[in-house]
Image (cartoon, rainbow, N blue to C red):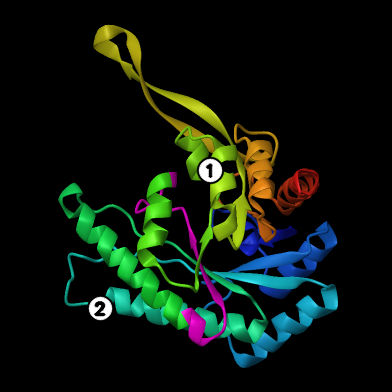
Amino acid sequence: MIPTLFSVSYAGLWGQDSLDLPSFIQKSAELGFRAVELMGKRPHLSILGTSSEDVSTIRKTAEACGIEIATIAGYTNFTAGKESAEVPLVEMQVAYVAALSRLGRDLGARIVRIFTGYTTDEKACHADWTRCVSAVRECAEAAADYGVILGVQNHHDIGVSYKSYMEFLSDVDHPNCRAMFDPWSIALQGEDLYECAREMAPYMAQTTLADYIRLKRYAYMPGLVNYRQLEDMVRAVPLGDGFIDHQGFMAGLKEGGFDGYVAYEMCSPLRGGGSMANLDACAARSLKVLQELI
């Protein structure tokens, strides 16, 4: 397995300090990571703003640092915009994935990552599912044209539970579509991470790890002089400091035969804040845990 750092961690999206891609690649090497995943949107690898000169600079930087560019991370939501049926939003997103696949090929990446879609209305459950299956299959074809693997991450609502994720990929049924199965959403659902990982391992190209603590929330009810409990808030912490059973998850991956990329990401507000010093410290601590897990 190959420890990988995701550039979203240094993109500044949650008010944290940020780096451009060449600086991020250099940082990844300094921290000790062997590969990187590049965020496929501004301020990093935008299909609108990345020139051939930029591609050359990024690739040469990676080669000089001994860093593999493993994955380009796309951001899709195939159920978006249903209120504007005249706008071809699925077609636009497939074209976006094709453009990322071209950039991925030019950078020497092996994988382009996408999501499915968010739930719109329970009456549209089957229609949303079918729409996402069709779109992902089309994206798999587009990625294949550029010689890169399409990976589907279990993040958005459609297919987010373990069994429905397997069912979704079975419905897509495309040889260029692989799983990017992560423990985060599955842990929040209370599933057995070891068993899920062991079963998913043969179908996987990559997994992404992060860790979180649960913070209970309550709302005060003045008339009752009491509190009612709300859904927990979760907050990102370095690997090993949270509630996710990464040991069980990684043991399942090993037993199932997975030997791909294992990325670390800081993709939400982080304990300790967003300073460069805190980002670096969390990434370094998490890499040490990741190496022990591998």
Please name the residue shown 66% across and 91% down the image: 53
Q: Where is 147 relative to 258, above or below? A: below
Q: Residues within 10 Å of mark 1 (few under 14, many from 20)?
A: many
Q: Which residue is mark 2?
A: 88
Q: Amino acid at mark 2?
A: Pro
Reply yes or no: does residue 240 show up in magenta. no
Position of the N terminus, as image quadrant, is bottom right
Q: Secondary structure at mark 2?
A: loop
Reply yes or no: does residue 152 show up in magenta. yes
Please name the residue shown 78% across and 44% down the image: 285
The residue lying furthest to the top in this view is 225
Gap in angstroms between the C-alphas marked 2 and 1: 36 Å
Please name the residue shown 60% across and 84% down the image: 105
Question: Seen in the image, is 100 located left or right of residue 27?
Answer: left
Q: Closer to the camera: disc 2 or disc 1? A: 1
Q: Which residue is mark 1?
A: 196
Question: Seen in the image, is 86 located left or right of residue 41?
Answer: left
Q: Where is 278 relative to 77, above or below? A: above
User: Which one is in front, 7 or 15?
Assistant: 7
Q: Residues within 10 Å of mark 2 (few under 14, many from 20)?
A: few
For the magenta stretch, what is the residue range? 143-162
Q: Position of residue 249 (x, y in %)?
A: 62, 41
Q: Amino acid at mark 1?
A: Cys
Please name the residue shown 17% across and 65% down the image: 83
User: Which one is in front, 229 or 162?
Assistant: 162
Q: Can residue 195 be seen by looking at this rendering?
A: yes
Q: Can residue 269 be seen by looking at this rendering?
A: no
